[in-house]
Image: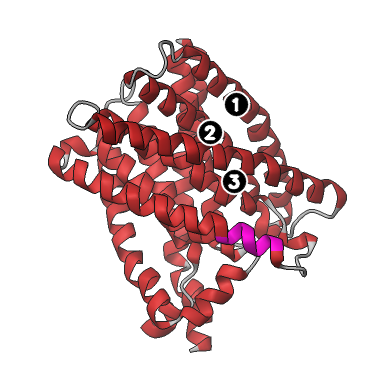
């Protein structure tokens, strides 16, 4: 077995993508409960797994900051790896959303409220710091080659856009007992959504320019193409959350115009999904080696599916709901495959740390 100290030193920042993906799948299943009742049990199990994963990774994640800051600093400045550090606070946001959506049958309301606000504040602070730092490093580095630019650069904008996903339930929780706090949370949600969405547009121009004018990324980076669905899916979910919170706070009378905007963004996701499938098939024929990047298949896809179910409810469209259910079945199979491959390949994923220790 790998040396524990080596595991901590070389702990990959993308491990928390598994928390994002597992939690996203649980939330997607929850939204389909009305049609498939047994999904409730599956969602409960997934939340339990997600809590275990979050706590399991917490020690090496924190330990790396304390005992191996030199190696962590190198990764943080890396044009590729640096983007994955936000997966930890995003995992915290998704776990908090799990508590509010699925947790009432498992935990007390007091625990959910306290855990939710703690995870929210923790995530907001870290996401802001990482957003500033990652973009700063992109500005000041003069050796970034086209091969280092891909859809993984969208992870930072996604992190900012995800904040309303937990902020929305918190606003609903505190709007009666502490309307001032609820208003502050809604304001934070809007600020960070603006940051993330504009960065998505700006970075998107850079990434698409790179893909058009240079050769495609190597096969190991193929799963990162799915990250494009992240800001699109979470963008729609975030707009719906802000619309609901703003109406509850009396800031807007009618949330439907915002929901229409979220639906338009979801519509762009249809093209992105088909484009992603086509590109994945192209890569799959040549072979995609397993690595931590495979978790990029899961959370962005889950985000798009959650957005699909929200749009289905808004439009009252059975067709859109069926479309979401088909994708949900595919997502569940993909999650199982990636989880099993991660467990089977655990030793090989830790092997680099073993060799370097």
Residue found at x 53% / y 42%: 300
Residue found at x 33% / y 65%: 58
Quarter where residue 131 is shown: bottom right
Near-viewer residue (191 or 91): 191
Quarter where residue 189 is shown: top left
Dot 3 or dot 2, earlier in sequence: 3
Q: Is mark 3 on a helix, strand or loop?
A: helix
Q: How many labels does the image show?
A: 3
The relative height of residue 4 versus residue 282 in the rendered view (above or below) is below
Q: Which residue bears the numbered disc 1?
A: 265
Callouts 1 and 2 close, C-beta under 8 Å = yes
Q: Report how far apart the C-alphas of labels 3 and 1 lie in the structure.
A: 15 Å
Question: What is the x, y in percent for residue 342?
Answer: 46, 62
Q: Is the magenta stretch mostly helix, strand or loop?
A: helix
The relative height of residue 104 versus residue 49 in the rendered view (above or below) is above
Q: Report how far apart the C-alphas of labels 1 and 2 lie in the structure.
A: 7 Å
Q: What element carries label 2?
A: helix
The relative height of residue 123 versus residue 323 in the rendered view (above or below) is below
Q: How crowded is mark 2: few (under 14 residues within 10 Å), some or many (20 or more)?
A: many
The relative height of residue 162 versus residue 70 in the rendered view (above or below) is above
Q: Which of marks 3 and 2 is in front?
A: 2
Q: Residues within 10 Å of mark 1 (few under 14, many from 20)?
A: many
Q: Nearer the viewer, mark 3 or mark 1?
A: 1
Question: What is the x, y in percent for residue 73?
Answer: 54, 75
From this viewpoint, is residue 101 visible?
A: no
Q: Which residue bears the numbered disc 2?
A: 235
Near-viewer residue (248 or 34): 248
Question: What is the x, y in percent for residue 119?
Answer: 31, 50
Residues in magenta, as a range: 133-139
Which mark is drawn over residue 227? 3
Q: Report how far apart the C-alphas of labels 3 and 2 lie in the structure.
A: 13 Å
Left or right for 234, reference 3: right
């Amino acid at each position: 077995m790998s040396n524990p100290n080596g595991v901590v030193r070389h702990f990959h920042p993308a491990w928390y993508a598994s928390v994002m993906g597992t939690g996203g799948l649980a939330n997607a299943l929850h939204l389909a409960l009305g049609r498939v009742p047994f999904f409730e049990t599956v969602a409960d199990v997934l939340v339990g797994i997600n809590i275990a994963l979050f706590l399991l990774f917490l020690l090496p994640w924190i330990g790396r900051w304390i005992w191996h800051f030199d190696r962590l600093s190198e990764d943080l400045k890396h044009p590729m790896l640096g983007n994955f550090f936000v997966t930890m606070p995003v995992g915290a946001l998704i776990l908090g959303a799990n508590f509010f959506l699925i947790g009432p049958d498992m935990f007390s309301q007091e625990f959910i409220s306290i855990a939710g606000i703690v995870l929210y504040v923790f995530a907001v602070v870290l996401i802001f710091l990482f957003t500033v730092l990652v973009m700063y490093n992109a500005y000041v580095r003069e050796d970034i080659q086209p091969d280092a630019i891909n859809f993984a650069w969208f992870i930072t904008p996604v992190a900012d856009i995800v904040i309303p996903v937990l902020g929305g339930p918190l606003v609903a929780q505190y709007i009666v007992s502490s309307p001032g706090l609820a208003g502050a949370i809604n304001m934070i949600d809007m600020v960070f959504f603006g940051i993330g969405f504009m960065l998505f547009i700006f970075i998107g121009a850079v990434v698409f320019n790179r893909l058009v004018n240079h050769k495609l990324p190597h096969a190991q980076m193929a799963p990162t193409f799915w990250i494009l669905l992240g800001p699109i899916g979470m963008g729609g979910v975030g707009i719906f959350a802000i619309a609901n919170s703003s109406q509850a706070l009396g800031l807007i009378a009618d949330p439907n115009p915002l929901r229409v905007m979220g639906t338009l963004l979801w519509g762009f996701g249809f093209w992105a999904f088909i484009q992603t499938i086509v590109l994945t098939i192209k890569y799959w024929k040549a072979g995609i080696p397993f690595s931590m990047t495979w978790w990029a298949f899961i959370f962005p896809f889950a985000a798009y599916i959650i957005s699909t179910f929200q749009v289905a409810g808004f439009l009252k469209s059975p067709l859109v709901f069926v479309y979401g259910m088909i994708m949900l079945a595919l997502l569940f199979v993909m999650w199982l495959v990636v989880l099993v491959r991660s467990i089977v390949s655990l030793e090989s994923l830790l092997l680099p740390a073993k060799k370097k220790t």
